[in-house]
Image (spheres, rainbow, N blue to C red):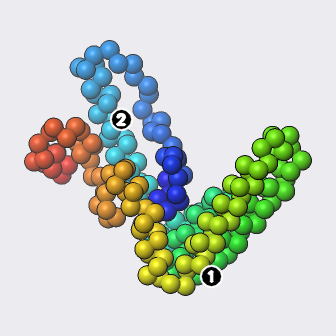
Amino acid sequence: MWLWRESEDIYFAVGYRVTEAPFVEFESEAQFAPAARRLAGIAARKVIDYRGLFPELATAARYLDQQTRRHGEPNDAFDAGSPGLIGDRRTAERAFNGHDSLVAAHLESWESLDWFRADEAHYRAEAKHAYGKSERFRSLEYYSGATRGEVSAITEPYVGALKVRPPGEAVHCASELKPHAMKASTRADSCR
């Protein structure tokens, strides 16, 4: 989930659920606890791996640019431009122009389809909103203070709601994922 994209839904932008551990049916706490610990450990390692994929915004922008080239999704193109706003205007402009072109191409390809014609006003309103979104970010790219404020205003609710750790502070062990009732000293001691 890219935190700069306004969305009411939590979605998987990169990766998916942890599949390395088999499904275990719950029978009792004693039976299920080892499987839950194993899954938590795998998930903790995945968090570290994913954080390593994107150590900085420029890395995310490059990844998203590649995704756009591969799949032609407008949201990937929009997302590819968002990190570029922090410093690389040319990349951001190219990404937002690509976003707008993809939105227009999707609309054009859908115009003859029954499902589109049945709710054309809705899809055209979505496209107008998408154009407005890229235009808003495009207009901010020349004012770094305004850009940072805008991106911060968008991301703060997600950071708080998802309880995302500050950048650079990673989950180092599965025991950090145990219930909060566990003493902090016990968690810290078991992470080393």
Rendered position, 153 above or below 1 = below
Rendered position, 143 above or below 191 = below
Q: Which mark is residue 41?
A: none
Q: Amino acid at mark 2?
A: Leu
* Of 36 and 142, the residue lying toward us: 142
Q: Residue at x 72, y 49 (%)?
A: 122
Q: Earlier in the sequence, mark 1 or mark 2?
A: 2
Rendered position, 38 above or below 147 = above
Q: Residues within 10 Å of mark 2 (few under 14, many from 20)?
A: some
Give the structural element (helix, strand or loop) at label 2: helix
Q: Position of residue 130 (x, y in %)?
A: 66, 61
Q: Position of residue 10 (x, y in %)?
A: 49, 46
* Of 123 and 60, the residue lying toward us: 123
According to the image, label 2 marks what residue? 39
Q: Quarter-wise, where is residue 69 in the image?
A: bottom right
Q: Position of residue 15 (x, y in %)?
A: 51, 48
Q: Residue at x 44, y 25 (%)?
A: 23
Give the structural element (helix, strand or loop) at label 1: helix
According to the image, label 1 marks what residue? 90
Q: Outermost residue toward the top?
A: 27
Which is more foreground, mark 1 or mark 2? 1
Q: Quarter-wise, where is residue 166 in the image?
A: bottom left
Q: Amino acid at mark 1?
A: Arg
Q: Is residue 11 visible?
A: yes
Q: Position of residue 78 (x, y in %)?
A: 62, 64
- Determine whether, in the image, residue 49 is placed left or right of residue 178: right
Q: Outermost residue toward the bottom?
A: 142
Q: Residue at x 31, y 57 (%)?
A: 165
* Of 80 and 113, the residue lying toward us: 113
